């Protein structure tokens, strides 16, 4: 079933079933944002870009099943398309005693590390609305779940591939070369190939463990020239992966491992780190976590992110106040390309309805570091206000 067919099926089921829903819960918020960039030497590029996002999540509960609908709409006044919309989730889920079934646009997440999650491959990055790869498009899929021991086994058929949207040429952040909108696929079935994914997640003693496998089109494209123009090139990838976390006193140890093949080559990803938390810093209510992580991807410049050969260190400060104020700072360094990346993130509630968020990325990278190419010469600070509507 392709993406449009799945959407029609879900809309039909929504119309039939909502009349039988015993309870509907919802969360709705609007978030105006502004991004500040360094002044560019290109007159067509601005140093400020505004946007307004309306996001909501709706839950409908039945006797043995539930509906989840999460539409998102973003207005971009400085973009030629102006409107960007997506279903982050639009699904129906059945719960049995030993099995579950989920049909629709779903969010899949796997990983334990702080700076990046190399094993988190299934959902496409929403490059239009999100500076971070945690902003993901909904993935159309059919998922069977089986409760096995102290964990759950999920088997998914991914019924439609969603391409990564390409930023308009006068929009930032952007690549320093022009991309053609027409994508090229390694698979002869192109975006209509049905990808397969499996994941088991559970607890073994003091260890939270996830084991996964994937076979399909890689979500992060390479870029190749065709008839003198750059095109996104989506290769096939096949891998097995593991993500783990282990608490030992004040320490939290994490790892993400991946072994796979792409373009007839075998590759490996090794990422691991630790986090130590000081509680009640200097006799206060504050908690501070110190983090260090190391990332290695044997694909090097063909890796789907910046984690080619990098070390990341930083801290997270939780003030444990009524405003739930939190500050996080990370600094990354590439051992091969000698590039640096800084990330600053802060959030605090202003009232029961208002929340302020700050996100900044700053890079100093060599031109050959393709993992940071999107943010080359585009240091960015994003300020946003989020307003929650009452239920």
Image (tube, grey):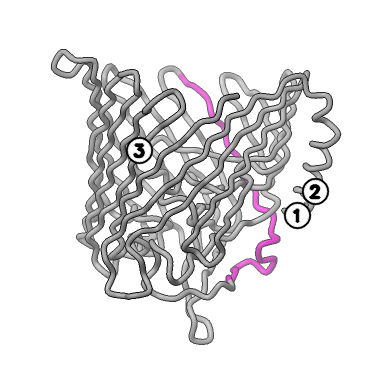
* Residue 286 spot, x, y in % from top left: 23, 20
* Residue 163 spot, x, y in % from top left: 58, 60
Q: Is residue 137 above or below residue 373?
A: above
How packed mark 3 is, by other alpha carbons closer than 10 Å (few <14, some 14-19, many 20 or more), is some
Q: How many marks?
A: 3
* Distance CA(mark 3)–CA(mark 1): 35 Å
Instruction: Identify the residue shown where x is 37% and y is 36%.
Output: 356
- Provide the residue designation for mark 1: 4
Q: Are marks 3 and 2 in contact (CB under 8 Å)?
A: no
Q: Is residue 381 above or below residue 166?
A: above
Q: Is residue 241 above or below residue 380?
A: above
Q: Which SS class for mark 2? A: helix
Please state the extent of the stretch shown in magenta in the rendering. Answer: 183-204
Looking at the rendered image, the disc whose residue lies closer to the viewer, 3 or 2, is 2
* Distance CA(mark 2)–CA(mark 1): 6 Å
Q: Is residue 199 above or below residue 353?
A: below
- Provide the residue designation for mark 2: 8
* Residue 34 spot, x, y in % from top left: 38, 51
Q: Are marks 2 and 1 in contact (CB under 8 Å)?
A: yes
Q: Which SS class for mark 3? A: loop
Q: Is residue 99 visible?
A: no
Looking at the rendered image, the disc whose residue lies closer to the viewer, 3 or 1, is 1
- Provide the residue designation for mark 3: 114
Instruction: Identify the residue shown where x is 57% and y is 24%.
Output: 151
Instruction: Identify the residue shown where x is 80% and y is 30%.
Output: 18
> Which quadrant does the C terminus fall into?
top right
How packed mark 2 is, by other alpha carbons closer than 10 Å (few <14, some 14-19, many 20 or more), is few
Q: Residue furthest bottom?
A: 227
Q: Which SS class for mark 1? A: helix
Q: Residue furthest top?
A: 283
Instruction: Identify the residue shown where x is 66% and y is 42%.
Output: 156
Q: Residue furthest left?
A: 282
């Amino acid at each position: 079933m392709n993406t449009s067919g799945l959407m029609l099926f879900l809309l039909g089921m929504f119309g039939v079933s909502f009349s039988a829903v015993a309870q509907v819960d919802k969360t709705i918020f609007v978030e105006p944002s502004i991004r500040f960039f360094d002044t560019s030497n290109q007159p067509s590029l601005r140093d400020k870009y505004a946007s307004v996002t309306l996001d909501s999540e709706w839950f409908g509960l039945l006797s043995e099943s539930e509906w989840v609908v999460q539409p998102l709409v973003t207005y971009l006044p400085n973009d030629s398309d102006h409107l960007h919309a997506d279903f982050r989730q639009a699904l129906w889920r059945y719960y049995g005693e030993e099995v579950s079934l989920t049909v629709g646009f779903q969010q899949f997440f796997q990983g334990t590390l702080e700076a990046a999650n190399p094993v988190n491959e299934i959902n496409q990055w929403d490059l239009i609305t999100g500076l971070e790869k945690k902003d993901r498009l909904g993935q159309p899929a059919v998922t069977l779940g089986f409760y096995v021991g102290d964990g759950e086994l999920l088997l998914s058929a991914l019924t439609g591939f969603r391409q990564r949207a390409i930023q308009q040429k006068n929009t930032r952040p952007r690549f320093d070369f022009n991309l053609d909108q027409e994508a090229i696929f390694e698979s002869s079935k192109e975006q209509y190939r049905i990808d397969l994914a499996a994941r088991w997640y559970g607890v073994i003693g003091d260890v939270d463990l996830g084991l996964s496998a994937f076979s399909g089109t890689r979500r992060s494209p390479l870029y190749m020239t065709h008839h003198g123009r750059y095109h996104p090139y989506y290769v096939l990838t096949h891998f097995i992966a593991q993500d783990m976390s282990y608490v030992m006193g004040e320490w939290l140890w994490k790892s993400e491992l991946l072994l796979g093949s792409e373009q007839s080559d075998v590759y490996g990803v090794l990422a691991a780190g630790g986090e130590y938390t000081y509680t009640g810093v200097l006799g206060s209510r504050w908690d501070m976590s110190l983090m260090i992580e190391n990332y290695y991807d044997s694909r090097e410049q063909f890796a789907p992110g910046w984690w080619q050969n990098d070390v990341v260190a930083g801290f997270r400060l939780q003030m444990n106040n009524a405003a739930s104020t939190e500050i996080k700072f990370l600094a990354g360094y590439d051992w091969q390309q000698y590039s640096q990346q800084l990330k600053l993130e802060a959030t605090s509630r202003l009232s029961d309805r208002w929340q302020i968020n700050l996100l900044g990325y700053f890079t100093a990278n060599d031109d050959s570091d393709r993992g940071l190419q999107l943010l080359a010469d585009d240091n960015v600070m994003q300020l946003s206000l989020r307003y929650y509507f009452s239920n």
